[in-house]
Amino acid sequence: MLASKYVIPLFWLPLTAAQTTQVDLGWHAPKKTWINDLSQVLNGTGTHGFIFNSSVLPTGTPYGSYNWCNMPHVRAKEYPVASVEYKLEYVEVIHRHHKRTPYASNTFPKESYSWSCSDEGLFYYGEPLKSGGNTSAETYWSVFTSESNPFAPTGFNGTCQFPQITKEGLDDSWQHGKDLYQVYHDKLKFLPHELGSKLTFRVTNNVITSQVAGMLVSGMYDPSETVPLRIQPSSVDSLEPAYTCASSSSLYGSYGVGSSVSNWTAHLSAAAPLFQTLDAISGVDPTSKDWHKSFDHYFDNLSARQCHAKPLPCSIKDPKNCVSQTLADTVYRLGEYEYSFIYRDSPLALQASTASYGVWVAELAQNIRDNISRKSSVIYRHNVAHDGSVSRLLSILQVDVMVWVGMGSEVVFEIYSRKGHGDKKYVRILWGGQILESSNPSLGKVDMLDLDVLLAYFDGLVGKGASKVPGLCQTS
Ligand SMILES: *[C@@H]1O[C@H](CO)[C@@H](O)[C@H](O)[C@H]1NC(C)=O
Ligand SMILES: *[C@@H]1O[C@H](CO)[C@@H](O)[C@H](O)[C@H]1NC(C)=O
Ligand SMILES: *[C@@H]1O[C@H](CO)[C@@H](O)[C@H](O)[C@H]1NC(C)=O
Ligand SMILES: *[C@@H]1O[C@H](CO)[C@@H](O)[C@H](O)[C@H]1NC(C)=O
Ligand SMILES: *[C@@H]1O[C@H](CO)[C@@H](O)[C@H](O)[C@H]1NC(C)=O
Ligand SMILES: *[C@@H]1O[C@H](CO)[C@@H](O)[C@H](O)[C@H]1NC(C)=O
Ligand SMILES: *[C@@H]1O[C@H](CO)[C@@H](O)[C@H](O)[C@H]1NC(C)=O
């Protein structure tokens, strides 16, 4: 059972003088599924229908199924249209970037094949914004190594940055934009015909989110004008998140990656033979803490290949010794288990995520308030982020079944008014294109929930203007 000091009881949170809204700010365990059942994860087989090997689902697999390479998002065909008495007022989208090469830190010391990205350019330049000024040429990065550079790059040779969004990931980003436009413009007639001040796009300080945003905006509007991407200074970026939050890091570390708590280490100890097999193939030092404190590195390493239809790796020394699909599937199951453990199963997860993602949540609450109080005319905000962003958000929302949020994983907040109900507002949250279900009873199935309840939940956890977050981030 959870320690009582972490249980925040029900309390009444006054909203306005005239109104009080009761919300439960406590942590509630997620549903029991194979993902958080260690014996099924370790001793099971396959991936329970989860896909890891293509952006396109195998024929017969319904859209909405988990696809690590290209997670489901809002799409016209599957979109749950709200009943006619509701009018859409405001939309905020956040999603993980699309598929990419692995991070350099997740590549094996030596790779048996190279990876080419010569089918795309990473455009990077500055240009004066004042019209009539000097203009920039459309210059892009072309990755190369030289014979005279005696330092071989770690991991893959080839013409990619590790990471960069791949050509296929760029196409997935474009389609994601097109799908959203078909719902919020074509179907619901909510978005304007032209880009303008009613829409904003935001990215993090990691360039891969800008690579996605450019393609996504093109998929939506194919604009001929330049488009600003909003970005915060890297030291305080709330979207990534990158602001300093010592208590959150130490809290995650106290029960998850790096901790010696037995219910965390159980899966790592049980997986010791698995690590041995993997290390023999990858050449990773068996004493490396980094590669053995979680499955993060091996998971990214194997899934990035398979998402791009590249073969599973073989040992450089012994080319017949390769990672089997069975072994890869086990790594995938373990990765799912870890994300569920870190962001949902642990009773400390809510607190750790609230501290480290509270600022973005407070910004979201403010954005919603600015629309309904008519302070801002922005009706659609779009955020391109990372798995650490979307996972923390789902942790705060207490999603009933947590997964490792794959490429393009999306959460949408939709704010509605209702005919005959005056100024009252309602909220739907879509996760993977469908209504999100929370284990927290105040949120439940977030389908036309009284907006005051969600705002009271956010305010209660993080404070208006994230006023509680600096305190939450302080280590005691
Ligand atoms: C997996 O199976 C092995 C062998 O049957 C057993 O010893 C082990 O306890 C099982 N692991 C879990 C977590 O159930
Ligand atoms: C991808 O994986 C699925 C299920 O794991 C399998 O049915 C399918 O044949 C695989 N596709 C490719 C292209 O390997
Ligand atoms: C996998 O890890 C190895 C070992 O660090 C690295 O060389 C390789 O580039 C990685 N590959 C991927 C796809 O991450
Ligand atoms: C372009 O740059 C040059 C050199 O700084 C400057 O003299 C010139 O005014 C600029 N041109 C425009 C159109 O701003
Ligand atoms: C990668 O390049 C290094 C030299 O930089 C070379 O020694 C190595 O064999 C190359 N590996 C592959 C897989 O091409
Ligand atoms: C792990 O163990 C701790 C300490 O016994 C406990 O408080 C916590 O609930 C357990 N976490 C999970 C996810 O089982
Ligand atoms: C909030 O969004 C709705 C939906 O389009 C719009 O009608 C309303 O004008 C917006 N609020 C403000 C202050 O512009």
Image (cartoon, rainbow, N blue to C red):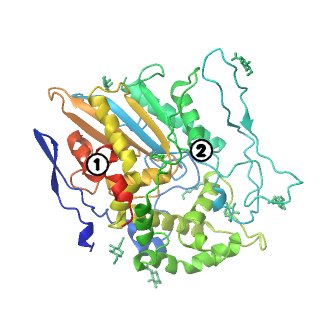
Q: Amino acid at mark 1?
A: Gly
Q: Amino acid at mark 2?
A: Ile
* Residue 311 image offset from top left, x and y in percent: 69, 59
Q: Quadrant of residue 297?
A: bottom right
Q: Residue furthest left?
A: 18
Q: Is residue 332 placed above or below 266 in the rendered structure?
A: above
Q: Quadrant of residue 337?
A: bottom left
Judged left or right of residue 187, residue 2 is left
**Image point 89% across, 53% down: which residue?**
147
* Residue 248 image offset from top left, x and y in percent: 41, 61
* Residue 362 image offset from top left, x and y in percent: 34, 44
Q: Secondary structure at mark 1?
A: loop
Judged left or right of residue 150, residue 313 is left
Q: Secondary structure at mark 2?
A: helix
Is there a contact, CB below 8 Å, between mark 2 and mark 1?
no
Disc 2 residue lies near ligand 3 with CB under 8 A: no
Question: Callout 1: few (<14), some (14-19), or many (20+) C-alpha neighbours within 10 Å?
Answer: some
Judged left or right of residue 288, residue 464 is left
Q: Is residue 58 placed above or below 7 in the rendered structure?
A: above
Q: Quadrant of the N terminus?
A: bottom left
Q: Quadrant of the C terminus?
A: bottom left
Q: Is residue 123 placed above or below 116 in the rendered structure?
A: above
**Image point 55% across, 36% down: which residue?**
213
- The reply to whether residue 394 is visible in this rendering is yes
Image quarter for ligand 3: bottom right
Q: Quadrant of residue 264?
A: bottom left
- The reply to whether residue 66 is visible in this rendering is no
Q: CA distance from mark 2 to mark 1?
A: 31 Å
Residue behind mark 2 = 208
Residue behind mark 1 = 463
